[in-house]
Image (tube, rainbow, N blue to C red):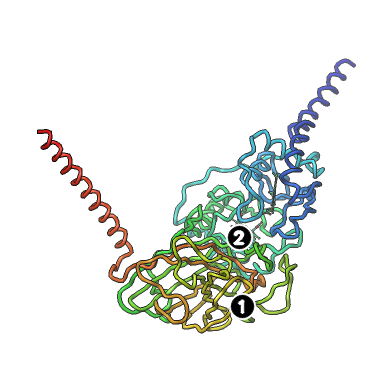
Amino acid sequence: MKNLTILLISLFLGTMFAQEAIMGTEAQRAAGKVIYDAQCSQCHGYDGDAKSVGNDYLRPAPRAFTSGTFKFRTTESGELPTHEDLKASIRDGMPYTSMPAWPQFSDKELDNLAYYIKTFSEDFIDYGDVKPIDMPSAPSFSEASAERGRVVYEENQCLDCHGNLGRGDGPSAPTLVDKWDQPIRAADLTKRWTWRGGATREDIYQTFVTGLDGSPMPSYNIQPPEDQWALVDYVYSLGASDEADYATVLAATLVEGDFDISQGPAIFDNVPVAMFAVAGQVIEPGRAHYPGVNSINAQVIINETDIAIMLTWHDMTAETEGVNGPNMQVPDDDVLNEPIEALISDAVGVIFPSEPTVGAEKPYFMMGDKSNSVDLWFADLASSDCDLYVGKGTGSIVQAESDIRIASSFEDGKWTVLLQRSLASENGISFTPGTFTPIAFSVWDGWNKERGNKRGLTSWYNMYVPPLEQVSPVGPMMQYALLTLLAQLALVAYFRIKYRKKEEEVA
Ligand code: HEC
Ligand code: HEC
């Protein structure tokens, strides 16, 4: 009898401690609730059901913790995340979604939050005792393995969603919806920095072995194991870097002789590429809460007479039918991607101040302002023209005569748009060699029904147009370095002479 009591007590204590390891103590959950109600509930809802003010606007939508479904786990498909998985998701956030990172929370606070989140789904009490999958250590990357990985990529239909070159443009991509019936995009595998499960080769392994529950991204049991790492290597080879290498300046390159955009992108060979971050316009009505494009690449060349700009960006589908325009009206309450009947085409815009700017002063980046207008080079990709508009704010955009030429093409999920004009023009801004000009970009994703003020945009950057006599972009910098050196030498000489004079005086 005594033994039985001890057994029962130890069983009871055992389950209590096991329970506590998963669910924390009451005090911990209460401490988690305080932070949660203050910092998380506006998106995830007080009851963890994502019924919140944020939910109507944010895509992907904030997670409903009541669903017990989690994307980023080290556990098998269909299982709950580990305690550490939850902490990592909170600490690191979800880049390129509205879920912030919370580096300010202590380990204890993260613990408390994770315990509290678990109370929203009973599953944690029943099945919360989960183990991470066995993570083999990654063999080193090899080209041969990546080459084999291409075959594995095709065999497993990754291509169907992620596209031939991984740009998120597979044939099924436009049809994808998540468990909560919201449209969702296949990740762009060339931009590892936009992933939420991490950018390392181990992270890629984990993503396709465990799957992203709640999203259309399945889990895969690929055999033999060598093929798993071959696939990892191929996916890894699709992107050039782990981090986004965003530019702050766009330096034009002076080239010798004539060029014409009808010659195609080859005229930009060896010209440096500047990548700029694109975000949804959410400041004024007609907001883009779920923009289709998150970065744009630009290259610029000039010669004695002309300037040409090459823009490239990744887009799930090319919308080359329908219309688009910077003045198209979007209802104020068009918070999400309300399906509208009209066919909207893809479009891109380059924005400059209409007049040379003085110092750091720039027109309002949205579309200029009353006293400082902007020139908008607007290319509706359903037409073969590039229009010129003069903007004095988003409510006042007027078309002007354009002498901008355009050539465009779309392949494997990438738009390429070439624009050309003479450096000096009666129609809009003239570019003065040897100066900086503010430049900004806008992109409209027609699939997303982006039109008018509903668009992706960048902030202002500077475009450097080199002087015409320097044929290398290194030129101005060398010149600057030389001048600085000469000035320093002169200064040294001056002090030496002065010092010597003093010495002579003393002597
Ligand atoms: C501004 C809105 C916003 C706030 C504030 C916010 N989140 Fe989120 N959170 C999101 C969105 C959106 C997602 C879904 C991202 C996705 O599906 O890729 C998300 C997802 C999550 C996930 C799920 C990860 C997974 O694997 O599925 C966790 C856990 C989470 N948030 C915890 C928190 C905690 C804890 C806080 C407060 C400290 C918080 N969030 C604050 C928007 C928010
Ligand atoms: C049915 C469509 C579909 C298929 C097939 C598919 N994926 Fe995905 N994948 C997605 C979606 C959708 C996302 C984005 C999920 C999200 O944003 O929550 C994604 C995301 C990813 C990510 C980024 C995860 C992160 O950390 O953000 C990687 C890497 C990935 N998939 C690799 C693969 C590989 C490799 C294959 C083939 C073995 C594959 N996918 C097959 C739809 C698919």
What element does badge 2 sit on?
A: loop
Does residue 488 appear in this view?
yes
Quadrant of the rendering where the C terminus is positioned: top left
From the viewer's perspective, tell me whether residue 197 is left or right of residue 147: right
The answer to whether the residue bearing label 2 lies less than 8 angstroms from the nearest atom of ligand 2 is yes
**Would you place residue 412 above or below residue 493 in this image?**
below
Q: From the viewer's side, name the closer residue of 426 and 252.
A: 426
Quadrant of the rendering where the N terminus is positioned: top right
> Could you tell me residue 341's position as x and y percent?
73, 78
How many numbered marks, from 0 up? 2
**Would you place residue 395 above or below residue 57 in this image?**
below
From the viewer's perspective, tell me whether residue 390 is left or right of residue 11: left
Give the residue type that dot 1 points to.
Answer: Gly
From the viewer's perspective, tell me whether residue 215 is left or right of residue 326: right
- Local crowd at mark 2 within 10 Å, few (<14), some, or many (≥20)? many
> Could you tell me residue 382's position as x and y percent?
58, 81
**Would you place residue 125 above or below residue 400 in this image?**
above
Residue at 85%, 23% (x, y): give it.
8
The single residue placed furthest to the front in the displayed view is 505
Residue at 63%, 62% (x, y): give it.
186
Does residue 129 appear in this view?
no
What element does badge 1 sit on?
A: loop
Residue picked out by circle 2: 187
Separation (CA) of disc 1 from disc 2: 28 Å
The answer to whether the residue bearing label 1 lies less than 8 angstroms from the nearest atom of ligand 2 is no
Q: Earlier in the sequence, mark 1 or mark 2?
A: 2
Residue picked out by circle 1: 325
> Could you tell me residue 392's position as x and y percent?
58, 72
Give the residue type that dot 2 points to.
Answer: Ala
